[in-house]
């Protein structure tokens, strides 16, 4: 019977001369070992009450279960070997659907860490219905704080609401920055699934570095359970070097996940040094931002070097840190 074994208590059955079976079996629902379902839910081993199977009086030995006596089923919601919430009052109806409520056990402040962020569960209170056909369905809400991102700093507080199979989310952020740039004017949305997992944060924003004259537009931003995937920027800015103000337009600014670095192509528009050096105006500039420290995290300062190749002149700056 699904994930339970049945321990026979009583059998009251008859079989007639045509091989037709009728009567009822009475059994105890027994789970000898913890059983994981839907990857994140662990049904705890125990004996959970009695159920019945009644034969329908045919020669096919078919019939119906009555599981309404199976009660007090305990189920843990587990992520990265950490229990986030527990259903301790699960009960079956006649058809074998489990109903109960997931709550955070008293005194527990659950959190888990992935290779790309830490998630701290502030609250979780959902009514749950489980069937083998549809898996879990929830009604209620959960509030989770995401922090210690691998490629950026700051935190995201996410509230997910579950209703009629639809998941809606709301977010607030604090101190979000990446590559030494403050991220502002955030226009973000989160995808959160019914297993209480963050699938992605995506949208657009602006980024401002203290050594650049203006913010640049981050047109595409995507952070998933696998870390930062997209950080594509455009815009114009000026940069001071050796008393000169060089104005640039970004032709390409893109994060490369495999290299954990940003690649930029820019065009030098003007060199403001009081001279008329036509050879240096409109020169294409290859700008490579390479991380000095390979691990971008909130615990280690993100330092990079920006290398600008302007005509035959190359110079370095401790930019993006």
Image (spheres, rainbow, N blue to C red):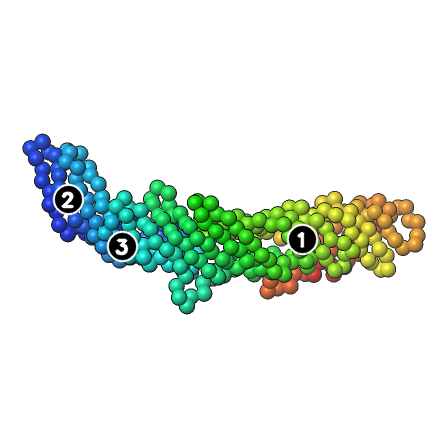
- The outermost residue toward the bottom is 107
Percent coordinates x, y for residue 233 in the rendering: 69, 48
Q: Residues within 10 Å of mark 1 (few under 14, many from 20)?
A: few
Residue drawn at the location 76% of the way across and 54% of the way down: 214
Element on which disc 3 rests: loop
Percent coordinates x, y for residue 293 in the rendering: 64, 60
Mark 3 or mark 1: name the one nearer the start of the chain: 3
Q: Residues within 10 Å of mark 2 (few under 14, many from 20)?
A: some
Seen in the image, is 271 located left or right of residue 226?
Answer: right
Seen in the image, is 217 located left or right of residue 202?
Answer: right
Element on which disc 1 rests: strand
**Most foreground residue, 160 or 270:** 160
Element on which disc 2 rests: strand
Q: Alpha-carbon distance for marks 3 and 1?
A: 51 Å
Displayed quadrant of residue 55: top left
Residue drawn at the location 88% of the way across and 46% of the way down: 279
Residue 59's tag is none
Seen in the image, is 58 located left or right of residue 166?
Answer: left
The residue beneath circle 2 is 24
Q: Does residue 34 appear anywhere in the picture?
A: no
- The outermost residue toward the left is 17
The residue beneath circle 3 is 71
Q: Alpha-carbon distance for marks 2 and 3?
A: 20 Å
Q: Does residue 171 appear anywhere in the picture?
A: yes
Q: Alpha-carbon distance for marks 1 and 2?
A: 67 Å
Residue drawn at the location 9% of the way across and 37% of the way down: 15
Mark 2 or mark 3: name the one nearer the start of the chain: 2
The residue beneath circle 1 is 185
Mark 1 or mark 2: name the one nearer the start of the chain: 2
């Amino acid at each position: 019977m699904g994930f339970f074994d049945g321990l026979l208590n009583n059998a009251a059955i008859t079989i007639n001369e045509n091989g037709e079976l009728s009567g009822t079996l009475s059994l105890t629902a027994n789970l000898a070992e913890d059983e994981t379902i839907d990857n994140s839910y662990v049904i705890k081993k125990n004996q959970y009450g009695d159920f019945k199977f009644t034969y329908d009086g045919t020669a096919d030995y078919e019939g119906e279960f009555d599981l309404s006596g199976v009660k007090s089923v305990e189920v843990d919601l587990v992520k990265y070997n950490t229990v986030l919430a527990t259903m301790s009052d699960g009960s079956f109806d006649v058809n074998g659907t489990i109903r109960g409520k997931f709550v955070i056990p008293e005194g527990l402040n659950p959190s888990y860490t992935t290779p790309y962020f830490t998630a701290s569960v502030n609250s979780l209170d959902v009514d749950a219905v489980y069937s083998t056909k549809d898996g879990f369905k929830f009604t209620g809400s959960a509030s989770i704080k995401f922090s210690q991102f691998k490629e950026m700093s700051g935190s995201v507080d996410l509230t997910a609401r579950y209703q009629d199979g639809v998941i809606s989310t709301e977010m607030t952020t604090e101190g979000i920055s990446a590559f030494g740039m403050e991220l502002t004017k955030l226009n973000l949305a989160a995808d959160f699934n019914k297993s209480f997992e963050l699938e992605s944060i995506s949208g657009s924003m602006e980024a401002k570095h203290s050594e650049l004259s203006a913010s640049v537009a981050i047109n595409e931003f995507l952070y998933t359970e696998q870390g930062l995937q997209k950080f594509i920027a455009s815009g114009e800015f000026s940069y001071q070097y050796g008393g000169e103000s060089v104005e640039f337009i970004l032709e390409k600014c893109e994060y490369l996940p495999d290299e954990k670095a940003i690649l930029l192509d820019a065009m030098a528009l003007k060199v403001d040094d009081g001279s008329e050096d036509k050879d240096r105006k409109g020169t294409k500039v290859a700008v490579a931002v390479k991380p000095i420290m390979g691990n971008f995290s909130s615990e280690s300062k993100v330092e990079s070097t920006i290398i600008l190749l302007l005509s035959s002149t190359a110079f370095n700056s401790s930019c993006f840190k």
